[in-house]
Image (spheres, helix red, strand yellow):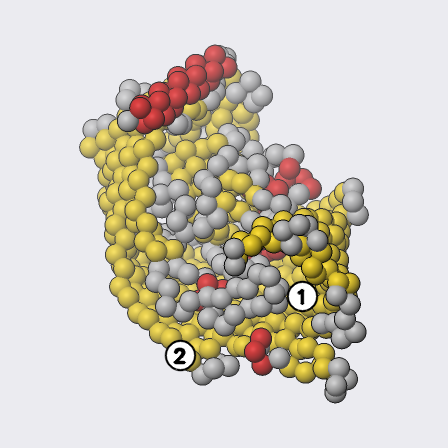
Amino acid sequence: MTYIRYFLFIIFLNFILLISINSSIAQQGNGSVKGYVIDNEANEPIESAAVSLYSNKDSSLVKGMETDNKGEFILTDVPFGSYYLEVNMVGYNTAIVKGLMLNPNNKEINLETITLKSGITETEEILVEGEKSFIEFHPDKRVFNVGQELTTKTGTATDVLSEIPSVTVDSDGNVSLRGSENVKILIDGRPFGLDGSNRSEILKQIPASEIESIELITNPSAKYNPEGTSGIINIVLKKNKEQGYNGNLSLNLGTGDKYTGSANINLKNSRFNLFANYNYRLRNSDRSSSHFRENFSNNSISFTEQVETGNSRRNSHLLKAGLEYSINDKNTIGISSVYSDRSRKRFENSETKELDSFNNIVTQYLRNNDEDEDGYHLDFSLTYASKFKKPKQLLTGEVSYSRSSENENLISRQTDIVPTNTTPEKDNDYEKDITNDINIQLDYVHPFSKDSKLETGFRSIFRNSDNDFRTEYYDYIQNKFITDTNRTNQFIYSELINAFYGSYTGSISNFGYQLGIRLEHTNTDGELVTTNEAFNDNYLSVFPRASISHKLGTSQELQVSYSRRINRPRLRFLNPFPNSSDPLNIRKGNPQLKPEFIDSYELSYLHYFNSSVVTP
């Protein structure tokens, strides 16, 4: 109990210190918001339109006025903070402008032209780009707007993620959220082939300049796939919203023989949006490592030392293209595709020594590994969105297909020093991984009021993976390479997941809440072709989710949430065939592994200041 009290006391001191620091840096000041309101058809100014500015914290009215005979308005002496603007006029639709942020670095917001449509009673939301704060808090996620950060000018998605609080990226590109690598990573809400072993390589292919924001979803709602014990990281890419012809070209050079380049083109009008992007990346790097192992066996002690040096050359291309077409004001259809290919050449030298308890060399050998790796990823999707007369009532659907392929050839040559050997090992390893994914999803949102809505939907995921591994050894008698059947195998694994979910969001007085449930049925089939072994499993899973928040005045909020999650074993954890490409580190999977279920509880406190937010 003493340690627990000490731990809680330390947390409390850090919490008080964090609040006091942020209170001291909260800056006071005022800014202004101005704009121009016109009629959509006549292209003429609208006089006497009601303009109201509301606080994002509690939706309270901060400033208000009417447009003059030129359709202009200017709201002055507005305290620094986050706002949204509402423009009303009888006989026209209502326009809500979101993303307004006033601070010492952005004291004046010029909205330029706001267009209203006559004879329409709908509400149209307008998001102001470039005015968003770096961090935004939502009931189920935190959003980091990284579009203007320096890292996004020349780096990759890996570089951007390494700058996000509670996200870490190690030297090999492995991403962790709150200390766990078991995190689901999405791009624009979709897997994009990031479930496989080559996730780090795909992230390094995505230019940071294409990223708009990073969403951290640590306790996801029932709408989201429950995979990933520590939560979800969603990478949101930029969308070009300017009409007409747009394009740009960028080239970057880096020390250590690193080069990147990109070209983007976009054609957009009121009905369709056609876009294409191309990115290229070349990176050279050197590496070194050392390993020391102390072995206890047969009542004796021995040691193993390994020293490795090497270099690699990575080359990648990424091409995106798509078309969005508005059938009418209510229905939109989209088609998009992404193709990426990558190659890597890596050379590695290693020296291994095995010593006895007196540090005498028992075995010493050199090993050279020459590795060629290449692969591609193809993603194709068809989307549909339908709006209703009621604002925020929405039906969306998506059908997508993705295919990933990776080839790896490893040539290993060994030179035995102690004892000498005239027939040293010569091995060739060939590995090919192919994964196909089909995703069908349908989502519906039905709002009952400003603060209440029902979300429901269906999702079906089919995934098939084929891992083919073959090893050859050199036979000095026959003077040729022969397939080693003891180290050759093919493992095929398929997974079908059907899911239904429902979620309700509402509020009572100063309390907001969300209740949801997700049902999933999973069927898996595995086949070890080499030994003619088959494995299968099927199970039903229930994932409840609940959250409640309480506003403590106008500047503070307390949130409590719970969700159930799942961690399904990956392919390399299931493949039962021993992988002994490294004789000192043999890896073997277990096809009988069951999924792991996790109950996640989260308590958070929000305190809004004029220009900062504290959230322990």
Q: Amino acid at mark 1?
A: Asp
Q: Amino acid at mark 2?
A: Ala
Locate the N terminus by quadrant: top left
- Look at the image and tell me whether residue 195 can be seen: yes
Helix, strand or loop for disc 1: strand
Residue 229: percent from the left, percent from the top? 39, 49
Q: For label 2, count other residues whose C-alpha is less than 10 Å away and answer few (under 14), some (14-19) or many (20+).
A: some
Q: Nearer the viewer, residue 535 or 167?
A: 535
362 vs 189, left or right, is: right
Residue 600: percent from the left, percent from the top? 32, 44
Q: For label 1, count other residues whose C-alpha is less than 10 Å away and answer few (under 14), some (14-19) or many (20+).
A: some
Tell me what residue is drawn at x 20 percent, y 32 percent. Answer: 508
Locate the C terminus by quadrant: top left
Is the C-beta separation of discs 1 and 2 under 8 Å?
A: no
Q: Nearer the viewer, residue 308 or 83?
A: 308
Q: Is residue 124 above or below residue 82?
A: below
Tell me what residue is drawn at x 47 percent, y 41 percent. Answer: 179
Reading the image, the residue beneath label 2 is: 534
Which label's residue is closer to the chain start, 1 or 2? 1
Picture mark count = 2
Residue 120: percent from the left, percent from the top? 36, 43
Q: Which mark's residue is nearer the viewer, 1 or 2? A: 2
Reading the image, the residue beneath label 1 is: 374
Residue 604: percent from the left, percent from the top? 34, 31
